[in-house]
Amino acid sequence: MSSSPTPRPEPVATNAFERASLPLTRFIAQLPPLVPIVVVFLLVIVGAFLGPWGAIPLGLVVLFLLWMLALSWPRLTTSEVLMRAAVIVLVLGLAAIKLFPR
């Protein structure tokens, strides 16, 4: 019995946007699965506590989530797109609150 993990499938590009994103998606695919999740979580936490400068890490999270949504768009159902869009709007709203406090 082999204890080696099964390899993840290699990302495949089907259009120009995916081909341009392929080097970064390959890099992310080589990372342990928890690393991107922890990085996004830490950016949101840091952004939430930084004051007006917190909009920068939150903006990075929004850009990353938009990029992930654009890459996965053709394969998602309508409800999955709406759930992902809701998370993006939530983080964007938090960034706007950081930029324009009362």
Image: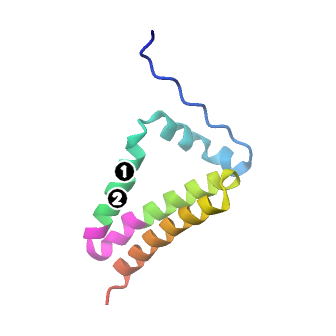
Q: Which three-letter amino acid code belongs to the residue tagged 2?
A: Leu
Query: In the figure, residue 90 lies in which quadrant?
Result: bottom left
The residue where tag 1 is placed is 39
Q: What stretch is highlighted in magenta?
A: 48-58
Measure the C-alpha gap from mark 1 to mark 2. Answer: 6 Å
Residue 33: quarter of image = top left
Q: Where residue 99 appears, x then y in whole percent?
A: 37, 80
Residue 5 against residue 50 in the figure, above or below = above
Numbered disc 2: secondary structure? helix
Spot the residue most to the right.
15
Quadrant in which the N terminus is drawn:
top left
Residue 43 badge: 2
Nearest the eye: 78 or 90: 78
- Look at 37% across and 85% down and name the residue there: 100
Q: Residue at x 63, y 57 (%)?
A: 70
Q: Image quadrant of residue 3?
A: top left
* Magenta segment, prevailing SS (helix, strand or loop): helix
Are the two marked residues, 1 and 2, in contact with CB atoms closer than 8 angstroms?
yes
Magenta stretch contains residue 99: no
In the rendered image, the quadrant that contains the C terminus is bottom left
Q: What residue lies at 39% left-to-right and 74% top-to-bottom?
A: 94
Left or right: where does residue 21 sit relative to residue 39? right
CA neighbours of label 2 inside 10 A, class few (<14), some (14 to 19), many (20+):
some
**Along the viewing direction, whichever of 44 and 53 lies nearer the viewer:** 44
